[in-house]
Amino acid sequence: MQYKAYDWIEPAINTIRRADWYRSVQAISGKPGAVVELEGKEVVNFASNDYLGLAGDDRLIKSAIAATIELGTGSTGSRLLSGHRELHRQLECAIASLKQTEDALVFSSGYLANIGAISAIVGKRDLILADTYNHSCLKNGAVLSGATVIDYPHKNVEVLDNLLSQQRANFRRCLIITDSVFSMDGDLCPLPKLSDLAQQFNCMLLIDEAHATGVFGATGAGCAEHFGVANSHLIQVGTLSKALGSLGGFVAGSKLLIDFLRNRAASWIYTTALSPAATAAALSAITIIHAEPQRRQQLWANVAHLKQQLPLPIIDSHSSIICCQYSSASLAMEAASKLKNAGIFAPAIRPPTVPTSRIRFSVMATHQHEHIEKLIAALQDIKTV
Ligand SMILES: *Cc1c(COP(=O)(O)O)cnc(C)c1O
């Protein structure tokens, strides 16, 4: 008899293709940077999360190599068993100092940090209120926690206020979760109002600072610093893999919270500690973020330059993520492919990742004036084709 258990896969892929939702990878060669080689062609890179241009920085590379030579390639075990190194603790102290929190805990990725934190601090008797545009790891962390999850419309604090009035009393703990910079639109969460509501209704508030850490605020601490919101009642999650140019994630917060997570966050306890190379590179990035505020200044100058001259309407953005909307996935794909021919690398982001198709441009501190001019010219051309 023929084995048919996997026969559903091919038609499922065909369905994905028909919707223009099919995805595949493209190889970049060489070091990351403002200009990269994409499938043999040199392109200006507007597709990277490396906002400060640190992933290819010699200082990060050297510290990663030095840590590897000293400590080896792998951490060999979980933090609680054989994997913990003094270097991990140094990085956690540096993150806590950047974030101005009592303590921090490093995870193997931002995704695992969110899943681990959310599922550790709420459970079946609790309520999660979540922005509809939240990143996949906040959504999946919420599901994993077993808490009751209610989505509120994107950034809508009136609806959130009403939901809290109606629902808060029915649950033990309550957790509000949101991206601080929304990763696919580039707008910001209404943090001051969220913080007020959290205090008023006795809720915990977790913000995902993946696109804010190192970039927002006078010292690069993130959105809490940018908005001037006291961070003592916040749980801040972030990644080491965007502005910090490495790999890994973290949770920053009170000593008690971090101590609790060390005991209860399954995605921290049951996984191998971050590699020495990734740990050392992130530590080096934080030193640079403190020492070189001009990188942030250049990033924001580049963002202003692009926004001022962009020939297409953009989705409301207050970050280094700038999106041009298209009416269909196929139009967005076509535009991305024309941009690529013009030497510009920027991805089309389509459903189901986002509700509407768009091209997403990520600005970097290391983009030169002429890189941004090139993008503006290319967009002008494809608009008229
Ligand atoms: C990238 C991203 C993450 C995941 O971080 P990784 O370290 O890449 O796992 C989490 N949240 C948001 C909003 C992100 O954009």
Image (tube, rainbow, N blue to C red):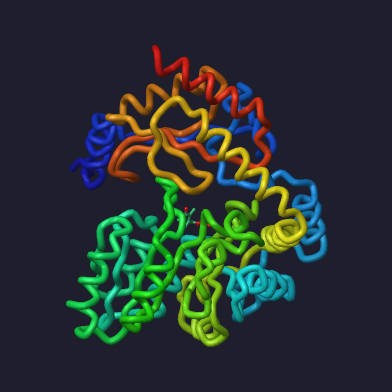
Taking the spot 45% from the left edge, 37% from the top edge, the residue there is 360
Quadrant occupied by the C terminus: top left
Report the number of discs: 0
345 or 214, nearer to the observer: 214
Q: Residue furthest top?
A: 385
Task: Judge whether residue 23 can be spotted in this image.
Answer: yes
Q: Residue 95 falls in which quadrant of the image? A: bottom right
Quadrant occupied by the N terminus: top left
Q: Position of residue 235 (x, y in %)?
A: 48, 74
Q: Position of residue 93 (x, y in %)?
A: 68, 75
Taking the spot 24% from the left edge, 29% from the top edge, the residue there is 18
Taking the spot 41% from the left edge, 23% from the top edge, the residue there is 335
181 or 19, nearer to the observer: 181
In the rendered view, tell whether residue 26 sits above or below residue 123. Answer: above
Q: Position of residue 244 (x, y in %)?
A: 64, 55
In the rendered view, tell whether residue 223 sits above or below residue 325. Answer: below
Left/right of residue 289 with respect to residue 201 in the rendered view: right
Task: Judge whether residue 73 can be spotted in this image.
Answer: no
Left/right of residue 320 with respect to residue 313 in the rendered view: right
Left/right of residue 18 with respect to residue 239 in the rendered view: left
Taking the spot 50% from the left edge, 32% from the top edge, the residue there is 346
In the rendered view, tell whether residue 264 sits above or below residue 20. Answer: below
Q: Position of residue 249 (x, y in %)?
A: 56, 63
Q: Residue 204 falls in which quadrant of the image? A: bottom left
